[in-house]
Image: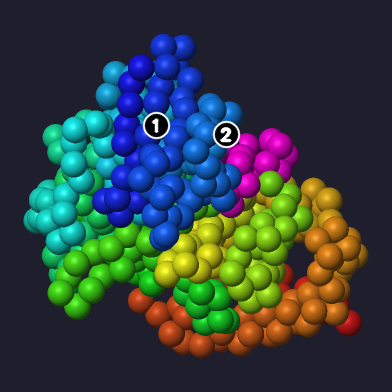
Amino acid sequence: MRRLVVYLNSKPVGTLDQDDSGLIKFRYTPDWLGRLDAAPLSRSLPLQSEAFRDKSSRPFFAGVLPEEGPRKQIASILGISERNDFAMLERIGGECAGAVSLLPEGVPPPAAGDMRMHELNDKELQEIIAELPRRPLMAGKEGVRLSLAGAQDKLPVMIHGSRIALPLGNTPSTHIIKPEPDRFPGLAANESICMTLAKAVGLKVPPVETRLIGGKACVIVQRYDRKISQEGTITRLHQEDFCQALGFPPERKYQQEGGPLLRDCIALLRDWSTTPVLDIRDFLDGLIFNVLIGNADAHGKNYSMLYQGGERRLAPFYDLVCTLAWPELSKTPAMKIGHCDSIDAITPAHWQMMAQETRLGWPMIRERMAELCSNTVAALREPRMQSAAIDEAMVERVAKIVVERATAMLQSLK
């Protein structure tokens, strides 16, 4: 039997065990269950004294790990099985999404304010960015224990002013650097314009910027699940994505693979959010916006819940990208609207079908569609929207796609 201690913001909340057959089991500690401020790790792991077996535990814990190519490469570097979630958490689970950290027994988390880091000069940062495709999340580098979900290369870092540092152990990061993959030229500019546009039309998104690092276009995203005090202390805010909250493992993040449906997402917000009316409205705006920008990849791991001060709220939106900018990518929506199989073919009839399935009012949906269409077109006319772009051609391509889609959506509502 192997064991990891599970922490929420340096407080031990439970243990994750792996038996000789490779199955995992999670159990809350009696001390945590006895606290007045005890909170569950996940909606799918409610507070209870009984242990959660592999099937119930895996969606949450596998959900904090990298996916697909990066996961395979990390496993190869560390000399572990690609499918062994426990072994991977044991090696890179010190700094994850949200407030969760996993450490071996006997390894205490650092005290608040006791941060270990390696400040990077320009040359070191450029070398790390260049190495990420071969060494995702700097796996295997001494002292580095970083984990982020997703299939794209990314690097959690600490940024203070102009200084960038690599967090060590389970020291929290503040930002995520996402280098542009060679197979998707223009992705950094694409994501940046989509996130900037989302903010302009009223969606909650974290601050983003684009930067060339060693000639590589990168998006730098400020983490919404981190809070920095005036004294510089970094506090983790807990969060989980919709797949984790609903009990879906990461390999089932797409609807067509047995993943969450839109009605599951709306039901989650109705039953779990502390402000369901506001969060359902915001989720609907995000859904409409993803259709407007032509993002067919808005799956269950691209929406999250943020937990802070006893509140459970829809997290800011992230990974907003116009996937239609690459014609070779699938047009099948990650979560279908009214059973429509193409993001290019969604009509008001599909939205009305979704309204019935989710018990939302069609007049309200129609009103939000019209307002977002108008505001999106108006925002794209602002000069600041396309200023300082690192890839003007991609920005123009995205703007053209979005204006055409917004105009067509408005016309269909008449």
- In three-dimensional space, the C-alpha distance between marks 2 and 1, rounded to whole angstroms, equals 12 Å
- At x 26%, y 56%, the residue is 173
**Compared with residue 335, is residue 135 higher up or lower down, i.e. above or below?**
above
Percent across and percent down for residue 391 are 41, 65
Q: Quadrant of the C terminus?
A: bottom right
Write the residue at 41% across / 60% down.
Answer: 37
* Disc nearer the start of the sequence (2/1): 1
- Residue under label 2, please give it: 56
- Residue 210 vertical placement versus 31 (above, below): below
Any magenta on residue 162?
A: no
Q: Callout 2: helix, strand or loop?
A: helix
Q: Name the residue located 59 percent from the left edge and 69 percent from the top edge.
A: 274
Mark 1 surroundings within 10 Å by alpha-carbon count, few (fewer than 14), some (14 through 19), many (20 or more)? many
Disc 2: CA contacts within 10 A as few (<14), some (14-19) or many (>=20): some
Where residue 160 sits, quadrant-wise, is bottom left
Q: Could you say which is closer to the camera, residue 242 or residue 219?
A: 242
Q: At numbered mark 1, what does the secondary structure look like: helix, strand or loop? A: strand
Side of 156 relative to 81 (left or right): left
Percent coordinates x, y for residue 83 in the rendering: 46, 23
> Residue 387 appears at what percent x and percent y?
40, 80
Q: Magenta residues? A: 242-259
Magenta segment includes 246: yes
Q: Quadrant of residue 128?
A: top left
Furthest-top residue in this view: 20
Along the line of sight, which residue is nearer the eye, 34 or 182? 34
- Side of 227 relative to 165 (left or right): right
Q: Residue at x 12, y 56 (%)?
A: 114
Residue assigned mark 1: 16
